[in-house]
Image (cartoon, rainbow, N blue to C red):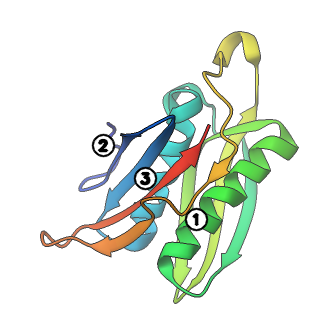
């Protein structure tokens, strides 16, 4: 679990052969940031990824839940095609449109020692909602 920003955390949750990623924050955008950090943490500890190179990401979906799945899948795509890992994120959400920047670096197999390859986010356990304490949660199961 990580608490890089006040009121924000990420964590993993078990799900059969796959793994769940969950982000919490005071806004949906911050929950998406934390969810992205949880995605990175499936592969390598986010603190071990240097935020050197920015990559712009844009998504749009009919609702926040599908937007979260699209966001995670966009990151998986960027990691795979650019052979990069990301350790820092900035997300802006307007309605159901997301504009983001992910900062990272090329994968160095000797230094990063990636644990697994994430194939994509699924709709299993997909949820974006405001909790009773006022915090936002964004979660999904990712296929590894």
Residue tagged 3: 34
* Residue at the (49%, 79%) spot, across then down: 64
Q: Residues within 10 Å of mark 3 (few under 14, many from 20)?
A: many
* Residue at the (71%, 59%) spot, across then down: 74
Q: Quadrant of the N terminus?
A: top left
Q: Quadrant of residue 8?
A: bottom left
Residue 16: percent from left, percent from top = 44, 37
Residues 18 and 50: in front is: 18
Quick check: 97 left or right of 79? left
Quick check: 71 left or right of 139? right
Q: Which mark is residue 3?
A: 2
Residue 141: percent from left, percent from top = 49, 51
Q: Quadrant of the C terminus?
A: top right
Mark 2 vs 1, N-terminal side: 2
Q: Which mark is residue 69?
A: 1
Q: Quadrant of residue 57?
A: bottom right
> How far apart are the two marked residues, 2 and 1, measured between alpha carbons?
22 Å
Quick check: 59 left or right of 140? right
Mark 1 vs 3, N-terminal side: 3
Q: Where is 75 relative to 13, above or below?
A: below
Q: Nearer the viewer, mark 1 or mark 3?
A: 1
Label 3 element class:
helix
Residues 119 and 46: in front is: 119
Label 1 element class:
helix
Q: Which residue is the extreme one toward the right?
A: 81
Q: Which mark is residue 123?
A: none
């Amino acid at each position: 679990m990580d608490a890089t920003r006040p009121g924000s955390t990420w964590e993993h949750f078990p799900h059969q052969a796959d793994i769940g990623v969950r982000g919490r924050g005071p806004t949906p955008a911050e929950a998406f940031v934390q969810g992205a950090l949880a995605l990175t943490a499936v592969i390598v500890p986010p603190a071990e990824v240097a935020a050197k190179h920015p990559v712009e990401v844009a998504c749009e979906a009919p609702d926040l839940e599908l937007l979260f799945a699209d966001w995670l899948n966009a990151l998986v795509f960027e990691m795979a095609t650019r052979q990069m890992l990301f350790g820092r994120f900035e997300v802006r959400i307007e309605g159901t449109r997301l504009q983001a920047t992910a900062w990272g670096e090329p994968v160095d197999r000797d230094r990063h020692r990636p644990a697994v390859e994430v194939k994509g986010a699924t709709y299993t356990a997909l949820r974006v909602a405001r909790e009773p304490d006022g915090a936002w949660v964004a979660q999904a199961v990712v296929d590894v």
